[in-house]
Amino acid sequence: MLENVTVFKGYPFKVGQKIRIEDSPRSGDWEVIHVTDHKVTLRCPLSGKEFSWSRFCYQVEESERPWPDTQAD
């Protein structure tokens, strides 16, 4: 029997990408500065702070918009 199934795939980060995370405690604009099979290191373009986290993002959309967004909530 067929069922309605939602499929999630981890996002294939690339060094140099400029990303925006929404709806997360890590919300904001980030630059990808290092990627391994298990971790991604991001840098805040405003503060310069860097954080390395287990890979956690899933792609929702891509769009043209200001980055970094200094007007974001």
Image: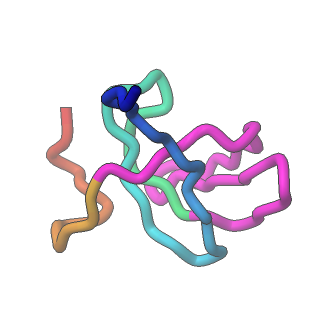
The picture quadrant where one finds residue 65 is: bottom left
Of the 4 image quadrants, the one containing the C terminus is top left
Residue at 69% across / 67% down in the picture?
Answer: 33
On screen, residue 1 above or below 53: above
The one nearer the camera, 39 or 44, is 39
The picture quadrant where one finds residue 46 is: bottom left
The x and y percentages for residue 34 are 76, 65
Residue at 58% across / 77% down in the picture?
Answer: 16
The one nearer the camera, 61 or 40, is 61
Q: Which residues are magenta?
A: 32-60
The one nearer the camera, 63 or 10, is 10
Query: Is residue 38 found left or right of 50 in the rendered image?
Result: right
The x and y percentages for residue 14 are 62, 73
Q: How many marks?
A: 0
Residue at 37% across / 31% down in the picture?
Answer: 2
Q: In the current view of this chain or complex, which residue is farthest to the top?
A: 25
Q: In the current view of this chain or complex, which residue is farthest to the right?
A: 37
**Colour mode?**
rainbow
State yes or no: residue 8 in magenta: no
The x and y percentages for residue 58 are 48, 46
The one nearer the camera, 44 or 22, is 22
Residue at 54% across / 49% down in the picture?
Answer: 9
State yes or no: residue 34 in magenta: yes
Q: In the current view of this chain or complex, which residue is farthest to the front?
A: 1
Of the 4 image quadrants, the one containing the N terminus is top left
On screen, residue 37 above or below 16: above
Q: In the current view of this chain or complex, which residue is farthest to the bottom?
A: 16
Query: Is residue 24 found left or right of 12 in the rendered image?
Result: left
On screen, residue 32 above or below 20: below
